[in-house]
Image (tube, coloured by chain):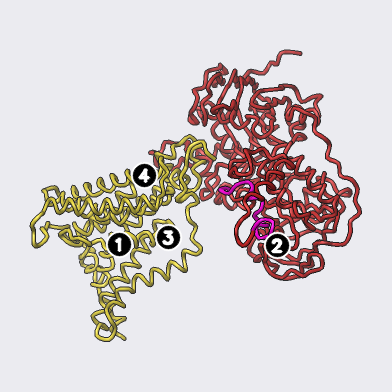
Amino acid sequence: MLEALDIFTQANFWAATLRIATPLIFGVLGALLCERAGVLNLGIEGIFVAGAMSGWLAVYLGLPLWGGVAVAAFTGALFGLIHGVLTVPLGLSQHVTGIGVTLLATSVAYFGYRVAFPNVATPPRIEPFAPLDLPLLGDLPFIGPILGQQTAFTVFAFLCVGVVAVVLARTPLGLALRAVGDNPEAVEAQGLSVVALRIGAVMAGSALMALGGAFLTLSAFNAFYFGMINGRGWVCIALTVFASWRPGKALLGALLFGALDAYQLRIQTIAGGVVPSQIFLMLPYIVSIAALVLVARRADYPRALMKPYFKGQR
Amino acid sequence: MHPDPRPLVLSLSGITKRFGPLTANDHIDLDIRAGEIVALLGENGAGKTTLMSILFGHYVADEGAIHIADEAGRLAPLPGGSAEAALAAGIGMVHQHFALAENLTGFENIVLGTQSLWSFGLGRREARAKIARLVAESGLAVDLDVPVARLSVGEQQRIEILKALYRDVRVLILDEPTAVLTPQEADGLVATVRKLAAKGLAVIFISHKLHEVLALCERVAVLRGGAKVADRPTAGADRATLAELMVGRAIPQRERPPSTPGAPVLSLKEVSVGNPGQRDRLENASLDVRAGELVGIAGVSGNGQGALAGLVAGLAAARAGEVTLDGQRLTSADPAGRVTAHVGRIPEDRHRDGTIGALSVAENYVLESIGDPENQCGGFIRRGDIRVRAAEMIRAYDVRCPGPDAAIRALSGGNMQKVVLARALEGEPRLVLAHQPTRGLDIGATTDVHRRLIAARARGAAVLLISEDLDELFVLSDRIAVVHAGHLSPAMEAASLDVRTVGLMMAGHTAGEAA
């Protein structure tokens, strides 16, 4: 029993929590941006895959690591553009289009990988982001080892949380974004373009989602595998509701999920003999569902979420 | 006539807009001067909305031109089809359905779209100062720092007007601004509009309420069938002449013959509906509606009307208290039971609750009686018989539609309501529940609904009328009760009440304070 609690005192556990949470932070921020503007983006799972693949491929072909990050973001924005054009001016079903984008992005990524590497036994590797070498912080007890295991990519994720929070709360752009997800007529009546705002938000959100994928191939691992996204995108969709569409709570939710996942990996080795490991694998998801049941019943969905807007039609 | 010395701010000339075979606007001319308050009157479909949409850039006119004064007072043509250009030229519009983002605060709604999207920060200090000045000038006091969703409808409307003023409008269009307000709030609005006009703002006031038009506006333009049929000063006009201009024929006065009420048909004794947390609930409500009597329920919508209507219609059950219908106790929510108990129900939202849009007129007509032997035989619908009876109904109620097989969603609101009315009244119900039966209908259709309700009362039915329109309540009701925040006042003789008293009670005063 004590061993189970002991996990929380290990720097390793907290380091893993941050590492697991990072792609989720990007994903939730991306989903939140899209949904705040009124568009559900179920393309997230596929955009994760496309971001992981394109970012990694760019670095493999010789670009610097941050160049790979940029390529991933660009890829995400491109799929966001597809989703945005289909759902905003054309007003197609956001569910169906989103699933379509996920299938398309996943397949294109896998296809591209197969074309580039037809006959490899082991996946080709790159040199990923190195752990941070922190001059003063690194020497702190407990905190030092936790931070020392992180990469600049994780720091970037935390920066993004701040940027998105400030933009949403304190700039005219954020104001327009929040308004367009609540009442597009209000935005139109003030002379702003609903279509431009929504497509812009979906593209920016999708770029962030793709960064979540790129973190896996450029920082957490050093290669691209099939099936490596493994539902992380869908988790982000649920975490967005959990976060009530707020960047700060999104960070909290991602960290919580990361901690649960890190915990279940460790408790498996302790109690694995007695309890089947699948039970522990389920743990983060069960807790997520339970948290959603508690939180989402009172969730304050953006009022115009999933409602297409056509100009001049009331 | 002296020429008006005030400068022209807006001039529409020869505005024409066609939608296929329909001419929505037919060569309309309209001039408005600074400081003038002009009413735009017309029935639904007369072309008011189209004209305003053209002015505001939502539609492009097929013919004609709009000229608007620039800051120096020179008239310049307004490019069509651009809301941005209309805003920049100083045209502001307060829609009947507010264009507010409810998750934002009033302040944020006002400044939305007034700064470059790529600028940083919200320029709060200058914006605040300007808004404070506007509030002081107009008297539109409202809390600007809570999400708009938490404000009352009247407060939201103030935000809407401030939003327009913040953009330095020279022409302000108010679309049915008083439809959602209590009489006192409406008085406040009228005072504000006068103040603004005195400072040189030109106001276009769109309304159905003729007495407001007469009280507020100096000139009235009347549209009928897409064309302007009158443009005259309000001085010397009265309600009857304006109504006649709108409809094109004299409006028959609604007559309410005296009737002697019988025994109570619907009786509520200390009934509570809904959770205490809800606003739309009832607490300890008592009410009798007697045979041959029409009882009106006044109140700003959302104060308990929904709970009352749900209770009577069988959609909700009472949490406490006793409800009886013709002496039978009603204990559970049982909509089908209400049908068999002969309750005719006219729901508030005919699109959502009153009809099924995809079904035909005939099918909607028999929805409540589809199980009767005359409508089905062994589980199969008697299509032929239903169609014949629906065709009879269409004649009797003068429903304008292609025929019994037309999908009901293709009908106009007034014609749809006639079908709902026919269904509710066909079995000669003991009790008629009419919840906002004339909302959104024009004068012709409204008169028709009123006639039918009076006829049901004359036949000996008990009629419960829930309405926000005080004129309607005073014309039709024998007794009136007021509901506010879930509390239902005792029903009082309509003849002993006046609009002011009822207005105060709608705002939460008791009958004693109000009198």
What residue is at 85 percent from the left and 57 percent from the top? Answer: B291
| Dot in front, 2 or 1 | 2
**Can I make out residue B152 in this image?**
no
Q: Picture coordinates of residue B277 (x, y %)?
A: 63, 64
Residue A265: image quadrant is: bottom left
Q: Between marks 1 and 4, how big is the CA–CA gap?
A: 22 Å
Disc 1, disc 4: CB below 8 Å? no
Looking at the rendered structure, the kind of residue marked 4 is Gly
Chain under numbered label 2: B
Q: Earlier in the sequence, mark 1 or mark 4?
A: 4
User: Which class describes the residues within 10 Å of circle 3: few (<14), some (14-19), or many (20+)?
Assistant: many
Left or right: residue B187 versus residue A280 is right
Q: Are marks 3 and 4 on the same chain?
A: yes
Looking at the rendered structure, the kind of residue marked 2 is Leu
| Dot in front, 4 or 2 | 2
Disc 2, disc 1: CB below 8 Å? no
Q: Which residue is mark 1?
A: A232
Label ID, residue A84: 4
Q: Which residue is mark 3?
A: A241
Chain under numbered label 3: A
Chain under numbered label 1: A
Looking at the rendered structure, the kind of residue marked 1 is Arg
Q: Is residue A197 magenta?
A: no
Q: Which residue is mark 2?
A: B311
Classify the position of the C terminus of chain A by image quarter: top right
Q: Between marks 4 and 2, how big is the CA–CA gap?
A: 45 Å
Chain letter for yellow, please.
A
What residue is at 47 percent from the left and 39 percent from the top? Answer: A310
SS label for mark 2: helix
SS label for mark 3: helix
